[in-house]
């Protein structure tokens, strides 16, 4: 079972519009609502792959109740932690040429007691979890050390932790030794405080984060693929993709692919890249099913191509 933790989940409402004109009443031609948030996305990908997953998240108000129901419809066990504030609604506007305009709400502020309730909800379920994936930014009310505390407590309970976050929440958690972290190029560059121009720069940065405490680093480098740096060595994998439809949630799909394939070694890296490549070929934040995956399109190298320039260098 893969347990996910999403401290600031959302209901993601998407409106399709014939035209986006400021200052007018816009009529949507279609609309839908999906469960959202980074850990929730990982759960959606794990469930789509046919594995058991439990999603821990604060849930409040009628929006929180709807989130729990939608998770159930996706085959995800919702472990909602009741909170006073209402779960946020994020809005995406889609134009006919696929241009996306997003409005992300801040989300409710959690009290100290609610923050503790979330940690407790994780603890009571950690014994049956193969991995605990903690993903996304922290809502108001949670201190930057909150993930560090979660990692420390989960390790005491004997669980393995995958952490996908950024900024102070990431750097503070490193000292507690998360088993794997999954920064993208931007997050990796920010964590080491210098730009990344080549795969070699990303390798050096990942090695530095291991020295600062991460057990393994799975760095996702957008179109360039992914780099895994762990105790057994460093590996690089990339996949050819004919048409990119949407990269939303590709990183979350990758992390799910990595964890469902065991969470270590080159085989798990190939699964991560196969999931990322499949995710970008699907619309919106749709998560790949096994039929969407093509691991044979993934090229794995045990000799990391250090000199290869990144298509999208991280400033
Ligand atoms: N343009 C692309 N072409 C091919 N593969 C891609 C492309 N963009 C992303 N991918 C695949 O998806 C993986 C994850 O993408 P990315 O590094 O952008 O993650 P991310 O920024 O964490 O995404 P998110 O947080 O939105 O889920 C990449 O490592 C790669 O395997
Ligand atoms: Mg990401």
Image (cartoon, grey):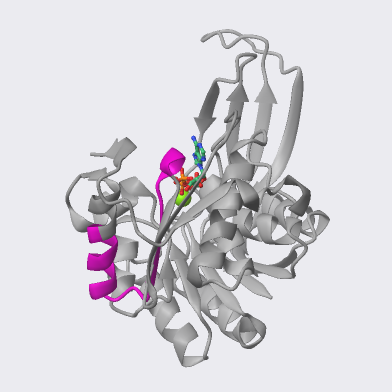
Q: Nearer the viewer, residue 96 or 83?
A: 96
Q: Nearer the viewer, residue 249 or 71?
A: 249
Give the side of residue 38 with respect to residue 48, left or right: left
Residue 39 in sight here: no
Q: Residue at x 26, y 66 (%)?
A: 207
For residue 171, what is the image quadrant?
A: bottom left
Give the side of residue 294 with respect to residue 244, left or right: right
Q: Where's the N terminus, which quadrant?
A: bottom right
Question: At which x and y percent is residue 74?
Answer: 78, 55
Question: At which x and y percent is residue 82?
Answer: 64, 67
Q: Residue at x 25, y 46 (%)?
A: 307
**Magenta stretch in the rendered image:** 204-224
Question: At which x and y percent is residue 312?
Answer: 34, 35
Judge whether residue 207 is colored magenta: yes
Residue 12 in sight here: yes
Q: How many marks?
A: 0
The residue furthest left is 194
Q: Residue at x 74, y 60 (%)?
A: 47
Give the side of residue 92 with respect to residue 305, left or right: right
Q: Residue at x 49, y 71 (%)?
A: 265
Judge whether residue 24 is colored magenta: no
Q: Where's the C terminus, which quadrant?
A: top left
Instruction: From this view, report whether residue 238 is shown above or below residue 109.
Output: above
Instruction: From this view, report whether residue 30 is shown above or below residue 211.
Output: above
Q: Nearer the viewer, residue 223 or 95?
A: 223
Instruction: From this view, report whether residue 74 is shown above or below residue 240.
Output: below
For residue 236, what is the image quadrant?
A: bottom left
Question: At which x and y percent is residue 22?
Answer: 51, 10
The residue furthest right is 73
């Amino acid at each position: 079972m893969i347990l996910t933790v999403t401290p600031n989940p959302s209901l993601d409402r998407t409106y399709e519009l014939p035209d986006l004109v400021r200052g007018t009443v816009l009529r949507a031609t279609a609309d839908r609502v999906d469960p959202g948030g980074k850990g929730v996305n990982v759960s959606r990908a794990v469930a789509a792959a046919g594995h058991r997953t439990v999603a821990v998240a604060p849930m409040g108000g009628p929006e929180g109740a709807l989130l729990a129901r939608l998770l159930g419809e996706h085959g995800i066990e919702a472990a909602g932690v009741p909170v006073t504030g209402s779960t946020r609604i994020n809005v995406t506007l889609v134009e006919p040429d696929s241009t996306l305009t997003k409005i992300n709400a801040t989300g409710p502020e959690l009290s100290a007691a609610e923050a503790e309730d979330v940690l407790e909800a994780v603890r009571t379920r950690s014994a049956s979890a193969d991995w605990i994936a903690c993903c996304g930014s922290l809502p108001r009310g949670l201190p930057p050390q909150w993930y560090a505390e979660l990692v420390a407590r989960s390790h005491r309970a004997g669980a393995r932790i995958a952490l996908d976050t950024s900024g102070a929440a990431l750097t503070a958690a490193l000292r507690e030794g998360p088993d794997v972290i999954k920064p993208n190029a931007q997050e990796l560059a920010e964590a080491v405080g210098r730009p990344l121009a080549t795969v070699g720069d990303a390798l050096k940065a990942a090695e530095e984060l291991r020295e600062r405490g991460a057990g393994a680093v799975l760095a996702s480098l957008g179109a360039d693929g992914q780099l895994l740096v762990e105790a057994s060595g460093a590996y690089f994998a990339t996949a050819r993709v004919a048409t990119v439809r949407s990269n939303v949630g590709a990183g979350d799909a990758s992390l799910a692919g990595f964890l469902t394939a065991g969470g270590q070694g080159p085989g798990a890296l190939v699964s991560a890249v196969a999931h990322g490549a499949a995710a970008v070929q699907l619309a919106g934040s749709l998560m790949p099913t096994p039929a969407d995956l093509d691991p044979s399109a993934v090229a794995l190298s045990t000799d990391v191509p250090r000199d290869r320039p990144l298509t999208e260098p991280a400033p």
